[in-house]
Image: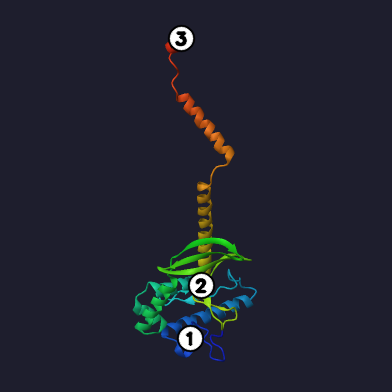
């Protein structure tokens, strides 16, 4: 029979030991075990065709007592967690209504994508430091992020302050333990930095004085337009001048 928990009591089957199984858990456990044993018998018998996938296992659906693939059971688990009535979620998981509500709330918060926007102020490079940034994380603005050009590209370093007790002499005032969030901040920071640099270049080109050669050519062109716009002298006046 497949192991469901270790000798040290480690919970390996849906985070439970057999002593904690609900009736639904017991049915699913038995169906899974039976499917695993049947698959093993088929694989050991050369006369029997092997399953389409050598790694595929099956589970029993509580809803209609049919065998489901892991992908289907994952979809069913998601339905319980997000869409099913709270009472059904509590029954399936073997928890109280309050615990089921907390499970759903935690799952919704975990899946929620917090918007992140970054504004950058580029500076003259000082070593690897090339700018400062403000990060708007779901409506909370955090200033003084450092825009750093490291060996693996541009990234945003957390704000920090002097700390004599620290090995580096500084201590971060903002911690981002989630790697995925840090990567989102870095990506937004890179985009904001390049956009800010582009704006500075465009602004500098707009106010930069034209070279002398271009100024002289423009002056000659303007003079030509003014001469062409002057009216020609009258013929009678020209005749009197000739006499």
Query: Nearer the N terminus, badge 2 or badge 1?
Result: 1
Residue 29 in the image: state x and y as whole percent: 49, 82
Q: CA distance from mark 2 to mark 3?
A: 86 Å
- Residue at the image position 45 percent from the left and 23 percent from the top: 230
- Please identify, in this view, whether the residue under mark 1 or under mark 3 is nearer the observer: 3
Secondary structure under tag 3 reads: helix
Residue at the limit of the structure toward the top, as seen here: 243
Q: Which residue is mark 3?
A: 239
Query: Nearer the N terminus, badge 1 or badge 3?
Result: 1
- Residue at the image position 53 percent from the left and 66 percent from the top: 186
Q: CA distance from mark 1 to mark 3?
A: 118 Å
Above or below, comparing residue 159 to residue 98 in the picture: above
- Please identify, in this view, whether the residue under mark 2 or under mark 1 is nearer the observer: 2
Q: CA distance from mark 2 to mark 1?
A: 42 Å
Does residue 45 appear left or right of residue 63 in this picture? right
Q: Which residue is mark 1?
A: 16
Residue 35 in the image: state x and y as whole percent: 53, 78
Given contact means CB atoms under 8 Å apart, are the residues at marks 2 and 3 in contact?
no
Give the number of the disc on residue 240. Answer: none
Residue 199 in the image: state x and y as whole percent: 50, 53
- Please identify, in this view, whether the residue under mark 2 or under mark 3 is nearer the observer: 3
Secondary structure under tag 1 reads: loop
Task: Between residue 6 and residue 219, name the one nearer to us.
Answer: 219
> Can residue 69 be spotted in the picture?
no
- Residue at the image position 35 percent from the left and 78 percent from the top: 86
Secondary structure under tag 2 reads: loop
Task: Please identify the quadrant where the N terminus is shown.
Answer: bottom right
> Can residue 61 be spotted in the picture?
yes
Above or below, comparing residue 241 to residue 213 in the picture: above
Query: Nearer the N terminus, badge 2 or badge 3?
Result: 2
Q: Which residue is mark 2?
A: 159
Task: Between residue 144 and residue 70, name the one nearer to us.
Answer: 144
């Amino acid at each position: 029979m497949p192991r469901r928990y270790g000798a040290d009591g480690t919970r390996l089957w849906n985070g439970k030991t057999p002593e904690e199984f609900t009736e639904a858990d017991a049915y699913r456990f038995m169906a899974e075990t039976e499917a695993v044993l049947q698959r093993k018998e088929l694989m050991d018998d050369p006369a029997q065709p092997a399953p389409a996938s050598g790694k595929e296992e099956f589970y029993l659906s509580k809803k209609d007592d049919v065998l489901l693939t892991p992908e289907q059971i994952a979809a069913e688990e998601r339905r319980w967690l997000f869409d099913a009535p709270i009472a059904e979620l509590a029954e399936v998981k073997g928890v109280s209504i309050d615990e089921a509500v907390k499970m759903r709330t935690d799952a919704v918060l975990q899946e929620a994508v917090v918007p992140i926007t970054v504004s950058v102020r580029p500076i003259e490079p000082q070593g690897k430091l090339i700018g400062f940034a403000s990060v708007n994380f779901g409506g909370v603005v955090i200033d003084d992020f450092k825009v750093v050009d490291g060996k693996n590209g541009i990234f945003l370093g957390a704000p920090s302050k002097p700390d004599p007790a620290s090995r580096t002499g500084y201590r971060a005032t903002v911690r981002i333990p989630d790697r995925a969030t840090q990567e989102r901040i870095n990506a937004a920071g890179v985009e904001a930095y390049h956009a800010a640099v582009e704006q500075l270049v465009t602004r500098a080109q707009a106010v930069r004085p034209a070279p002398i050669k271009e100024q002289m050519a423009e002056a000659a062109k303007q003079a030509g337009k003014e001469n062409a716009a002057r009216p020609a002298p009258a013929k009678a006046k020209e005749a009197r001048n000739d006499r």
